Image (cartoon, rainbow, N blue to C red):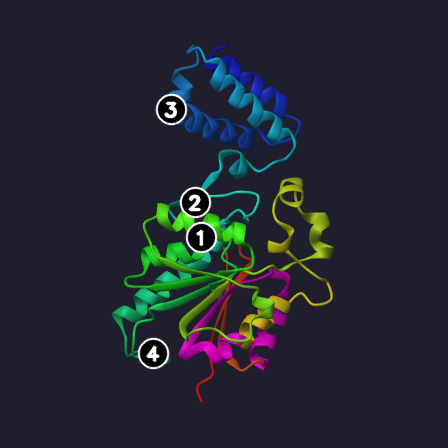
């Protein structure tokens, strides 16, 4: 079988399950992963014969895609904020909106570096960061990579996820202090932080019906869902810790449920935070929030 035939069979098999553009992307990612071919090389090497070994790998990937398994799990890797990350079914797949959250923190840090005495900012550049619910480590590792002299820690309840996060930190040549802990049972932290950030579980059970099979059937439920009765559980727990473990004028950043932005503002104000700022993602949805400890 040549490459052109392989692509034709691949496209035909998935045509009723995925949009054509997505199928094209799947094939190109697999061709790069298994053959080392760029998209251009795929287009000009159609007559090239494919080995049985590579053909078998494509066949396995095709079966897994038919079962709605995310392509990132099939490849075992993804890219986030310009960096490579290993992913497994033990970790949530990093999302583009989380990249926007990281970008916000990085830009804020750079702004403070350039104008360290601006109103409401600490007189020192933020250098201690805590990522709560780190998963692949994508937030923590990206901050460690892009913020000069950042000292980054990260917490997760999953030992399996922390193993992947540690491997990702090594691969990206950064140091992160990984902590195995259940944040819902954590009442104190070992130090104070200039910045705390979290992308916690925030999808209510009632929203499951609107989600794709690849997410529902394959990504870790514990990293995604909260009860309908208390959807702000993780946010409130983290905010309570932040009140006593953020440095003066320290900042707290969250990725949030777009449907609960008003409830988030009320909760954080009640918990003693001010300068609450919502931020829209590239799709115009309120998906990020920043606030600060009220000054004494």
Q: CA distance from mark 1 to mark 2?
A: 7 Å
Secondary structure under badge 3? helix
Q: Quadrant of residue 107?
A: bottom left
* Residue ID at (49%, 37%): 76
109 is within the stretch colored magenta: no
Q: Nearer the viewer, residue 78 or 179?
A: 179
Write the start and end of the magenta stretch as one range. Answer: 241-270
- Determine whether the residue tagged by mark 4 lies in a helix, strand or loop: loop
In front: label 3 or label 2: 2
Q: Farthest bottom residue? A: 296
Disc 2 to disc 4, C-alpha distance: 32 Å
Q: Compare marks 1 and 2 and give the one earlier in the sequence.
A: 2
Q: Which type of secondary structure does the marked residue at label 2 adopt?
A: strand
Q: Which residue, given by chain and number where applicable, does mark 4 sit on?
A: 122
Q: Residues within 10 Å of mark 4 (few under 14, many from 20)?
A: some
In the shown orientation, is residue 14 left or right of residue 281? Answer: right
Q: Is residue 116 visible?
A: yes
């Amino acid at each position: 079988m040549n490459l052109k035939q392989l692509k034709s069979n691949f496209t035909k098999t998935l045509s009723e399950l995925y949009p054509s553009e997505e199928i094209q992307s799947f094939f190109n990612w697999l061709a790069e992963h298994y053959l080392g071919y760029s998209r251009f090389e795929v287009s000009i090497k159609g007559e090239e014969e494919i080995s049985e070994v590579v053909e078998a790998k494509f066949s396995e990937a095709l079966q897994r895609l038919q079962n709605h398994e995310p392509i990132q799990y099939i490849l075992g890797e993804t890219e986030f904020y310009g960096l490579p990350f290993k992913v497994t079914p033990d970790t949530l797949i990093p999302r583009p909106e989380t990249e926007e959250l990281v970008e916000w923190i990085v830009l804020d840090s750079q702004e403070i570096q350039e104008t360290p005495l601006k109103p409401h900012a600490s007189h020192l550049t933020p250098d201690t960061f805590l990522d709560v619910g780190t998963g692949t480590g994508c937030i923590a590792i990206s901050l460690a990579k892009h913020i000069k002299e950042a000292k980054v820690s990260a917490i997760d309840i999953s030992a399996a996820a922390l193993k992947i996060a540690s491997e990702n930190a090594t691969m990206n040549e950064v140091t992160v202090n990984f902590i195995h802990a259940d944040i819902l049972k954590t009442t104190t932290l070992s130090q104070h932080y200039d910045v705390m950030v979290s992308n916690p579980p925030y999808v209510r059970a009632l929203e499951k019906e609107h989600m794709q099979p690849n997410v529902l059937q394959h990504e870790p439920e514990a990293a995604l869902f909260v009860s309908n009765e208390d959807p702000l559980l993780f946010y409130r727990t983290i905010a309570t810790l932040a009140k006593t473990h953020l440095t003066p004028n320290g900042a707290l950043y969250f990725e949030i449920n777009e449907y609960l932005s008003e409830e988030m503002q009320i909760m954080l104000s009640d918990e003693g935070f001010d300068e609450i700022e919502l931020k829209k993602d590239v799709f115009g949805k309120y998906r990020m929030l920043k606030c600060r400890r009220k000054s004494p």
